[in-house]
Every structure is written in structure tokens, then in C-alpha cells.
Image (tube, helix red, strand yellow):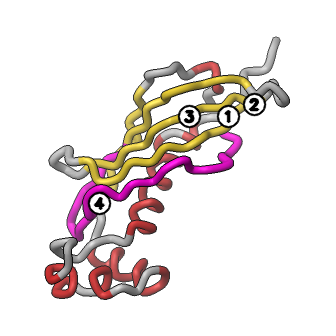
Amino acid sequence: MKYHDDFSVGQVIELGSYPVSAEEIIAFAREFDPQDFHLSEEAGRASLLGGLSASGWHVSSILMNLIATGWLNHTHSMGSNHIQEMKWLKPVLAGDVVTGRVTILEKRISKSRPELGIFTSVFHLAGSQGELKTEMRAITFMRVKPAC
């Protein structure tokens, strides 16, 4: 398990890939974002999205899954208190395989809680051709390595 101290500014961490199926897009949309272009290939093709497209909230959940399984679950993560910015740049369509990565932009130790390290990071989700689909900037808290 890694600590805040084990990471450096500029470090890029690959988070893995995730295949997005039509069935998953429709199931998520039925539950959480029931707009036609998330529920029907025909409606998606007729929209600006160009096909059956995952909801931005679904895409954000996929990114969070990759962040947790590809990085945070292998660290002494202590959560987050906010997302600074979320951009859905291009649609994630049925059949896409998306890949995530995180780049650490800044890191510091909390002044009020010295056991708490703070990262500012940018997270990217890209399609199989490398096209950027989603970008998120967020704060991540992680335990600092205890003094021996």
C-alpha cells in the first residue's frame, strides 16, 4: 500500500481500460438519466452525439471505477472533498473501450492535519484511438507515511 510520499508531481499513473456495452449504457440511463439518446441507438444517431451514448454521469462513474481499482485501492487513500472541474469532451458510445490515467499536478501536506497529504490531479479518460473523452480535475487526500 502506497502513501502520499510515494508519489511525485508530474507522475502519470495508468488506470486501466473499460469496455462500454450498449446494455450497460441503457441500464444506467433507465435508472439515472433517461434521455432518449442514452436509451436508443436511433435517437442517439439523430442527436449531436452520433450514436447510443453513455450519460456523462455514467462516464464519470466509469472513470471513478478506474481511479479506485487502478490507483486508490492500492494506497492509503482518505477520500476527497471536491471535484474542481469535470468536462465531458466527446461522447462515449456503445462499443467504446476507454482507458484512464491520472497525472499528479501538485502535492502538499495539510497544515492543520500533518498526517494528511493532498494531491491536485487531472484525470483523463480516452477512447481506443487515444481521443480524449473526459477530463476531471480533483483533490485527493492520502495518508502520509508515518514517522518511524
Residue at point 42%, 78% (across, down): 28
Q: Position of residue 38 (x, y in %)?
A: 31, 80
Q: Secondary structure at mark 1?
A: strand
Q: Which residue is mark 3?
A: 120
110 and 101: which is toward the camera: 110
Q: Secondary structure at mark 4?
A: strand
Q: Quadrant of residue 23?
A: bottom left
Q: Secondary structure at mark 3?
A: strand
Residue range of the region highlighted in magenta in the rendering: 76-100
Main secondary-structure element of the magenta-colored stretch: loop
Rendered position, 115 above or below 83 = above
Q: Is residue 53 magenta?
A: no
Q: Which residue is mark 4?
A: 19
Q: CA distance from mark 4 to mark 3?
A: 27 Å
Residue 142 is labelled as 1
- Mark 1 near mark 2, Cβ–Cβ under 8 Å? yes
Please rate how many residues cluster around mark 2, counting C-alpha atoms within 10 Å: few if below 14, some from 14 to 19, many from 20: some
Q: CA distance from mark 1 to mark 2?
A: 6 Å
Q: CA distance from mark 1 to mark 4?
A: 29 Å
34 and 22: which is toward the camera: 34
Q: Amino acid at mark 4?
A: Pro
Q: CA distance from mark 4 to mark 2?
A: 34 Å
Q: Is residue 78 magenta?
A: yes
Q: Which residue is mark 2?
A: 116
Q: Of circles 4 and 2, which is in front?
A: 2
Q: Amino acid at mark 2?
A: Leu
Q: Of circles 1 and 4, which is in front?
A: 1
Q: Position of residue 99 (x, y in %)?
A: 31, 47
Sooner in the amino-acid sequence: mark 1 or mark 2:
2
85 left or right of 6? left
Q: Position of residue 14 (x, y in %)?
A: 38, 36
Residue 7 is labelled as none
